[in-house]
Image (tube, rainbow, N blue to C red):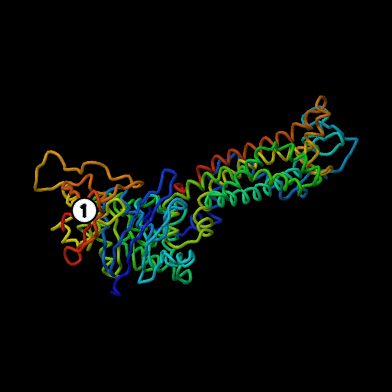
Amino acid sequence: MTANVPIRKTFWKRHWLGKTLVTIWEAPKFPTIVLLLFILCGILGPAITPHDPNKTSFRDSLTPPFWMEGGKVTYILGTDHLGRDILSRIIVGAGVSLQIGVMVVIFAGLIGSLVACVAGYIGGRTDMILMRLLDMVLSMPFLIVAVTLAAILGASKYNLIIIMACVAWAWYARVLRAEVLRLKEGDFVRLAIVAGASKARIMLRHIFPNIVNSLVVLATLNLGVVIIAEASLSFLGLGVPPPDPAWGSMISEGRNYIGQAWWLCAWPGVAILLVVLSFNLLGDWLRVRLDPKFRQV
Amino acid sequence: MNDVVLELKDLKTHFFTKAGVVKAVDGVNFTVRRGETLGVVGESGCGKSITCLSILRLVPQPAGRIVGGQVLLNGVDILTKSDREMRHIRGKDISMILQDPMLSLNPVFTIGNQVGEPIRLHQKLDRRAVWNKILEMLSRVKIPSPEVRAREYPHQMSGGMRQRIVGAMMLSCQPQLLIADEPTTALDVTIQAQFLKLFKEIQLQSNLSMIVVTHDFGIVAKVCDRVVVMYAGKVVENAPIRELFNHPSHPYTVALMESLPKMDRTEKRLYSIDGQPPDLRNIPPGCSFRPRCSQPMEICAEKEPETREIQPGHTISCWRTL
């Protein structure tokens, strides 16, 4: 295709940063914008909030969004029962969701792909033991395990990450192992053995890069699930301890006032919906984009 | 005798399955000299590929096992080597080309990256040197504009190019022996000739020995110096190329030659050998080709024929030529 055309070393085609920017530009706009906003909120957090997210003000409690009667322009999305600004709490809550989501996905993805490679490539008894362990993890109801573990370990952000990673890896391992089984029969793996590569090298250099695409797609889809799980646990009071805001606990607190003040539950709910939807849309797009057939030099 | 690169002595590879022991390779002897091309011919399931895999000790585990014999590489038995030592032999002393070039390359790496893999594994060179070596190998297998191609991915190449790239990868550490398991089966006929010519050239340049597994006598005639005919896990005839085509002696070889289409004869139907190759789980006593042989004798059912030399360098296993 491009054999005879000399490639100009432009920034956009050659430099990794340029290529990344081009990729982001080519991505579907809606989820990209939502997620960039989400990540921005997550990183900057308290620095860009209009109010202190934890400052209570009983005078302003249950102020509706600004366009409604009794709404104030300073509280764009209204305030909760303690008079805290909902927008600020959502922005800071994004940081919690982002941290937990990313950490869980990284840990679970790494453990999951490691188990998948070892079980799939080595096979035999190793495979059997690992897969039965995985069946055990997958057969336990997630919320009950999480509640039990949270009760033992105590509710905190880091325990939440550990709990969710302990459960989520099995899902990655199950899907990726099937991929490894398909790949290891491939001639290129055999050629690598012929070339004199060791087992560890084959797993790391020949099989793992082939499952990275699936891993990334799984991770984006899983990120949505993890954010919802985090919200569920926060809703049950097992997540981030109050008064620090988390989207799940915001919905949980707003539940009591839902008759008079819908905005307490609605805004964090919309935030969860938008972020999870965007991750799923982006995951679908990535699945196509990461196919090596779309890669060009 | 020191020009012998590889010698197989009574090699036996069996598969232990629930239905019984499959004797896929059952006492194979042959030698490959330096710079020589040995053709291994036979029908499907006669043990050609398993013989090759046994040389590299890559018999599918855990069912398959090499149960006896020796594989001598430069006089040293490699069946006694440890796995670690074996890894140093693979790719460096012996390498292999597989049948389907579409599956032989890893889709997520660039061509250059993959051609460089054996170099990185077996030679300590810095990145610049590895890259130069990759380009050198690619131009040796006549890939046009190697600097561009080395940065591309396998799906951007045609089948013939991919097979040449696999060749470049496998020759990059200058092995003494290259095993090609039906290297041209998946290529179309015009590319086949090109590919064979290229390998003949490379072989002459670097004094490489090759084992070419095939069922195509055309390829055998074009590239091989010596041919081994296998049947049911055994070598039935082993002869220099001219000798084999002029005086095929084993009934099986004769029958194989008969079943080739010929330009100078007009026949309605192509000759085919009756029957099926024997079940390798229970090979009948005596000669394993007897049920399909055109001139069986009584002794054939009783005793297995021994291998005898009927001409210098031409051995066969058949009672009829006594």
Residue lying at 50% horizontally and 61% vertically, measured from the top left: A198
Residue that lies at the very extreme toward the top in this rendered image: A259
How busy is the neighbourhood of tag 1: few (under 14 within 10 Å), some, or many (20 plus)? some
Residue that lies at the very extreme toward the right in this rendered image: A59
Residue lying at 14% horizontally and 39% vertically, measured from the top left: B269
Q: Which SS class for mark 1? A: helix
- Amino acid residing under circle 1: Phe
Q: Quadrant of residue B212?
A: bottom left
- Where is residue A152? Give x, y as percent: 80, 45
- Front residue of B269/B319: it is B319
B73 left or right, relative to A255: left
- Where is residue B91? Give x, y as percent: 41, 64
User: Which residue lies under the disc numbered 1?
Assistant: B217
- Front residue of B296/B217: it is B296
- Where is residue A179? Give x, y as percent: 51, 45
In the rendered view, tell whether residue B147 sits above or below residue B215. Answer: below
Q: Is residue A223 visible?
A: yes
- Where is residue A141? Give x, y as percent: 70, 36
A261 left or right, relative to B317: right
B156 left or right, relative to A149: left
A25 left or right, relative to B43: right
Q: Quadrant of residue A251?
A: top right
Q: Is residue A51 visible?
A: no
Total tally of numbered discs in the picture: 1
- Front residue of A220/A139: it is A139
In the rendered image, the quadrant that contains the N terminus of chain B is bottom left
- Check the residue under mark 1 and report the chain it is in: B
In the rendered image, the quadrant that contains the C terminus of chain B is bottom left
- Front residue of A125/A138: it is A125
